[in-house]
Amino acid sequence: MKANETARDAIRREILEVTGIDAEILGVVDLCEFPPYGRDIYVTFLATHVRGYPKPRSDAVEARWFSANQVRRLKKITTLTKLLVRKVAEGDCCLIQAHTIEGTQEEAKQ
């Protein structure tokens, strides 16, 4: 993340920089800790396509759309990614809205 950038803005910027896709971040679908490998925490956000076509940019070699079934058959993909794609495709996940403290305060006033 850059200074003064929200997590949603950083993710949206990264998606655009790497794939050429403008996306709207809908919320968080998973938080996974990896204590055996250090203190890494993976936060997975769900996004929807706004505009653009997949084109590899910056550090991407390839960028394209995949169906949930195609993802399941990929060999170079993590088990966690396969699990999350299945859960989202089957509607078996809970979406937590991503927001800022400022946004929460504004909503509370209404």
Image (tube, rainbow, N blue to C red):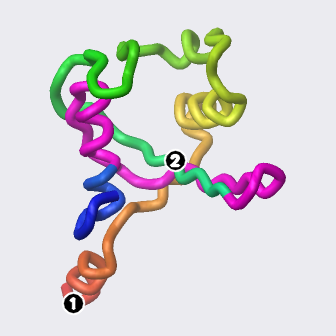
The front one of 25 and 42 is 42
The kind of secondary structure element at disc 2 is strand
Residue type (three-letter) at the residue carrying disc 1:
Lys
Residue at the far left in the pictured view: 51
The stretch in magenta equals 11-39
The kind of secondary structure element at disc 1 is helix
Residue type (three-letter) at the residue carrying disc 2:
Thr
Contact flag, marks 2 and 1 (Cβ < 8 Å):
no
Location of residue 100 in the rendering, given as x and y in whole percent from the top left corner:
32, 73
Q: Which residue is mark 2?
A: 44
Location of residue 40 in the rendering, given as x and y in whole percent from the top left corner:
65, 55
Q: Quadrant of the N terminus?
A: bottom left
Please state if 66 lies on the left or on the right of 81 as rendered: left
Residue name at image x 39 percent, y 15 percent:
61
- Tell me the number on the disc at residue 109: 1
In this view, the mark in front (2 or 1)? 2
- Tell me the number on the disc at residue 85: none
Eyeballing the image, is 89 above or below 38? above
Eyeballing the image, is 110 above or below 89? below
The front one of 77 and 91 is 77
Q: Residue 4 is drawn in which quadrant?
A: bottom left
> Few, some or many C-alpha atoms within 10 Å of disc 1 (few <14, some 14-19, many ≥20)?
few
Residue name at image x 32 percent, y 55 percent:
8
Location of residue 99 in the rendering, given as x and y in whole percent from the top left corner:
34, 68
Magenta stretch containing residue 9, yes or no? no
